[in-house]
Image (cartoon, rainbow, N blue to C red):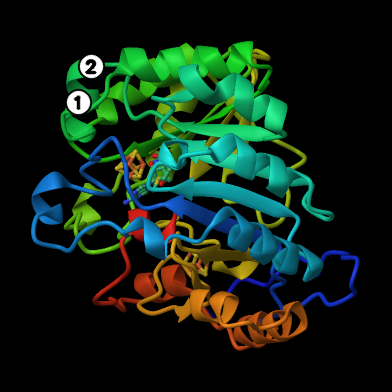
Amino acid sequence: MLLNTSKTQPGPNAAGTAVTDRFARPLQDLRLSVLDRCNLRCTYCMPEASLDGQGSFLPVSRLLTDDELERLVRVFAAMGVHKVRLTGGEPLLRPGLPALVKRLAGIAGVSDLAMTTNAILLPRLAAELAESGLGRITVSLDSLDETVFTEMSGGRGSVAEVLAGIEAAERAGFGALKINTVVQRGVNEASVLDLVDHFRGSGHMLRLIEFMDVGNMNHWSPAQVVPGAHLLKQVHDRWPLKPVSDQQAGETARRFEFLDGQGEIGFINSISEPFCGDCTRGRVTADGVFYSCLFSTSGTALRPLLRGGLGDAELTEFIRSLWSQRDARYSEYRNGGEQVRSKVEMFRMGG
Ligand code: SAM
Ligand code: SF4
Ligand code: SF4
């Protein structure tokens, strides 16, 4: 049996229209890509060389407008989605992001509005985003070593800029941040303990992510993955850890706390320990294509429906029907030896 038993339950929602998929997984989280463009070119996500000749970014006319995004989130929230994460591409590049955040933060049922960002533009935007009602920020940072960082970011941005972004988020009142580090064998393995040392005791939680086979541009191979168990041992040998007692079903990270009281660290072992059984996440691209799995090869365009005069009730019914047919569990199939071709790129789908 591949699929883990789901421990999640459909969440409460105002309209009483919670929906579950074929494996009884409720739709509770929405990853909303607000833009496919980015100011970095991370080699594991949007490598410059592969980008050439692979088509252009979305023209502005194809992006969902703020009105459309607000409407869509309202519809999802009425179906039981309470967590919304803004992502991309780089969400901070979307013009007028604080105004959009304010509209989304005001939607009934959305209790957790978060954003994943490379942090480069946070010094400019963090205060306004806090005032607009953004609840949480996750920052991606793969190394504290400028040379390694630059190698992984495709020569753009710098560690200093990301750290300035983190400080700006702190000043704006975003308390505990999550710091995401994608670990790639032979590239930034040696950066891991420095990152742990830096963020232990800072109030932020470092999360070490196994390099995933999202999309096709990054030319992923299993040999480039450092298993989370190996990283856990490495960290534990230096700073002893114990599993946290309040681990929630549906959490992507396995969390551990430092025995010396210096906070927590997370391990996102998507390759070695897939968590499809508890996956309650749907995704919508910046041009309104709905995907039920990070590794989907095709999605469903919602933009024509939004622009074609469909009412909220019909839209709700349509999305309910999509989710109720969902049987996605790619990470478990992959480990069973199955490979998917033509996967959608992470920066297009929203990480
Ligand atoms: N640009 C923003 C950022 O980097 O935080 C948001 C979008 S990015 C696609 C979202 C997250 O996906 C980042 O934390 C990034 O490190 C992660 N990511 C991208 N490609 C990945 C891959 N192949 N394997 C694992 N994580 C990946
Ligand atoms: Fe941009 Fe984020 Fe992808 Fe890096 S991981 S290229 S910052 S979208
Ligand atoms: Fe969810 Fe798909 Fe990832 Fe499994 S592979 S955890 S179903 S996004």
Per the model, the C-alpha gap separating discs 2 and 1 is 6 Å
The residue under the point 22% across, 64% down is: 216
Which quadrant holds the N terminus? Answer: bottom right
Q: Quadrant of residue 48?
A: top left
Q: Does residue 247 appear anywhere in the picture?
A: no
On screen, 195 above or below 232? Answer: above
Q: How many marks?
A: 2
Question: How far across and how far down the image is residue 191, in percent?
Answer: 30, 23
Residues packed near mark 1 inside 10 Å, few (<14), some (14 to 19) or many (20 plus):
many
Percent position of residue 198, x then y: 46, 12
| SS of the residue under disc 1 | helix
Residue at image x 15%, y 54%? Answer: 51
> Residue 150 shows which numbered tag?
1
Q: Are marks 2 and 1 in contact (CB under 8 Å)?
A: yes
Query: Secondary structure under badge 2?
Result: helix
- Residue 40 position in % (x across, y down): 27, 36
Label 2: few (<14), some or many (≥20) within 10 Å? Answer: few
Residue 20, image quadrant: bottom right
- Is residue 29 toward the left or the right of residue 126 in the image? right
Does 198 sit above or below residue 216?
above
Residue 345: mark? none
Image coords of residue 170 (percent x, y): 60, 15
Residue type, numbered disc 2:
Glu
What's the residue type where badge 1 is placed?
Thr
* Residue name at image x 53 percent, y 38 percent: 96
Q: Using residue 323 as the reference point, say whether residue 117 is left or right of it.
A: left
Residue 278 appears in view:
yes
Q: Say which of 136 and 223 sits in front.
A: 136
**Which residue is label 2 attached to?**
146
